[in-house]
Structure formats: structure tokens, C-alpha cells
Image (cartoon, rainbow, N blue to C red):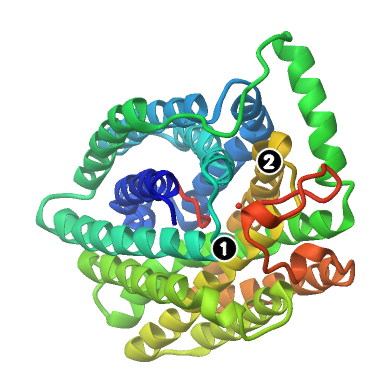
Amino acid sequence: MNPASRRVQRVYLILMLGNTLAASFIWGINTLFLLDAGLSNFEAFAANAFFTVGMVLFEIPTGVVADTVGRKASYLLGTVTLSVSTGLYWLLWLWQAPFVWWAIVSILLGLGFTFFSGAVEAWLVDALTSTGYTGSLESIFGRGLMVTGVAMFAGSVLGGVIAQATNLGVPFLLRAGILLLMLVYAAFVMKDMGFTPDRSRGPLKATREVLVQSIEHGLKKPSVRYVILSAPFAGGVGIYAFYALQPYLLELYGDETAYSIAGLAAAILSLAQVAGGLLAPKIRGLFAKRTTTVIGASLLSVAALVLLGLNSIFWLAILLLIVWGFVFAVAGPVRQAYLNDMIPSKQRATVLSFDSLFGSLGGVFIQPALGRSADLWGYGTSLVIGAAVELVGVPILYASRRQHDPADTNTMHLDAAPTAPAAPTGPDRPESP
């Protein structure tokens, strides 16, 4: 890797480290935080669903911002929005606010995350191309996953311990503070490279043209379309399971006030993520097609969720949690590389936002439905139902595989890949409130 590409990778990894560290302070306790504020299971997951509503509403407009104004501008806007809305979340908890306010602020949190989704990945791929990077995308995304896994481990453990030593609101204040530090860092070091935003047109015309081109190279291209259409099932179930496992593991542990256990669960997932990020390129190399890796990981995820739901032993649940986190982590970089290799640079951020939007749609409908099933039949049953829902996405992924897109077997480096718009080169959640 040449020095310029190494610098791009370093900035990307620091951005991922800071964002994930900030976010993960609350990942291990978010559901407990909402329940402590007086919300029911249904309301807590409905609040998460409104977060994903915000992502659905703003994914495309903010993706267009990244493609027409700039990737850096989108990132900075996201950092400010997320820091402010996190502070508002803390105030709602302090005031024991009614549900309607949780819904409104959750939408603002979703807005903050949509400025990130697509923009950072698009910035990375374009910057690497401009610096003559000659490695594989899987290796970069794998390193990113390892860094975020380490950050998630540190943040979730600290968040759980700090919450138990103080109260459930302090980790939210820490999150807002770290986001402000990341704002300052990105303002100085992040530069749009390999991409020149077109600011010559009015915003409405620019938005319309980017959307038309993004649909043309995204939803109208079958191999891309089926990957995007599969996102709601894995995405919606994944974010529900991540948060449902917090109170479920405490239930199995036998002490519903042991917040450090909830933080430990998120930390274990982070270690599984580090292992998955490290091994993803090697596991990808075992198969001729990228879709084999992604589909296989989806099937293993379904099996792990079923066993988690049927299990009643705490330590066995921890082992199954490791398996579930690992297979998700392996699939992530491979799916990102597959999707990016099919998207032109000029529409990359917006098409990636389409993908994130569809994943968010799954969260809008699946989270409250599974939350209601947890109210009625318990967390275990809701996880089994979630496994059945995730399984629906597997045939859709297989439909993408049947298109035989060159990206499915692509082993070329960025500088050797085709550059014509028809054959482009080229990257949450579970993202969370």
C-alpha cells in the first residue's frame, strides 16, 4: 500500500473508531434505558422503529447531499445532528417524557445516522481509487470491522460499568461528547478525494438527476436490486435481536439490574466482530462467489437465533451470541465489496443510501412487531419468530446470485477494475439509536 492510500485508510479507521466508540457507550444499555424511562417493551422497540423511520425519510436526501455537496460535509452534518439529538434523549429520560417525544427525537437520531450512511464508504472507495490503491476492498472493510469491534468492546463494557456505577443517563452524555471531538477531527483531516461534487445546478435539479441515475444503476440493475431488497429482513431482525438480547440475557442471568452483564453481551459481540473482520477475506477466499459467503452466513444466523430462542441456559446463550455475531461480521465486508463493485462512483453514496434505507424499512415494521411478540410470549419466542423473518431474505439474495454479475467473482484490485458506468468498480447496522 502506498503512503497516500495508507493515510486514507488511517483516516477511515479513526473515523470508524470514534463513531463506534461514541455509539457503543449506549448499545449495551439502550433497551434498559428506555424501559427505565417508563416505556413498555412495545414502546421501547417502537421508539427504535421511529429511529428507523427517520432513516427511511432522510436516507435519500442525505445521500444526495453526499453526492452533490460532498462526503465530508455530509459527515460533519451527521456528527452535529447526532450529538444534539443524543443530548435530547438524555433530557427525555431525565424528565420521564411521554412516548410522543421519544418518537420525535428518535426520528432526529435517524436523521443524524443517514448523513453517515453511504457517505463514509463512498469517501473511502473514491479516495483509495484516486491514490492508486492496489489491494482488495474486503481487506479494508475487514480492518474497519476489526477497529469498530475493538471500539464496540471498549464502549459497551465501559457503558455498562459506568451505568451501574452512576446511572443509565451518563453513557449518553459521554456519547455526545465524543461525537463533538470527532467533529473537530474530521473538519481538519477529511478531504474529498477522487470525487468532485457538481454544485453548478440548483439543489432540486441536482437531486432529481442524481436520483434518476441512482435508480438506473441501483434498483433497475437486478443484481444490485436483489441485494438491496434482501436488506430489510436481515437488517430489521438484526437490530431487534441486538437490543432484545439485553433484557433477555439479564432474564437468563437472574438479575435484571446487572447492567454490566448487558454491556458484557455487547462486548462479546464486538469480539466476535473483530474475529469476523479478521477472517472475512480468508473465508471469502474459500468460495468462488461472494454470494456463497453471504447466503451461508445468513443461514447460520437463522440457526443461531432459533437456538438462542429455545435455550434457557445463560452461558450457552453467550456461546450462541458469539456465533451469531461472528457470522454477521463475516458477511458484512463481503456484502459491502460485492455491492460497491456494482455501483458507479458518482452515484455510490446515493445507491448505498438506498441499501441502508431498505434495511431501515425492516426496522420500522419488524422491531415493534417482534417487540409486541416479546410482550405476549417472551423474548425467546420473539427471537425464533425473528429467525423465520430473516430466512425470507435468503431466496432474494439467491436471486442476485443468479444474475452472474462479474462482481460476484471479482478478485481484481481497484486500479484494475473496469471503469465504464455499466460495469463500475467499487462499500449497522446494525446502526442504532
Give the residue at x 76% y 46%: 419
Q: Nearer the viewer, residue 27 or 200?
A: 200
Above-or-below relation of 425 to 380: above
Q: Which residue is mark 2?
A: 348
In-front residue for pair 312/271: 271
Q: Can I make out residue 238 in this image? A: yes
Q: Amino acid at mark 2?
A: Arg
Dot label at residue 184:
none
Circle 1 SS class:
loop
Judged left or right of residue 396, residue 62 is left
Q: Residue at x 70, y 9 (%)?
A: 200
In this rendering, the answer to whether 304 lies above or below 422 is below
Q: Quadrant of the N terminus?
A: bottom left
Q: Indicate the position of residue 20 as horizontal and vertical percent values.
A: 36, 51
Residue 386 image offset from top left, x and y in percent: 63, 71
Closest to the camera, between mark 1 and mark 2, is 1
Say the numbered circle drawn on residue 136: 1
Image vertical order of residue 247 relative to residue 360, above or below = below
Vertical relation: 171 (above or below) 233: above
Q: Work out how far the residue at label 1 is from the one at label 2, CA to CA, in angstroms.
A: 18 Å
Q: Amino acid at mark 1?
A: Ser
| Label 2: which secondary element | helix
Q: Residue at x 28, y 81 (%)?
A: 253
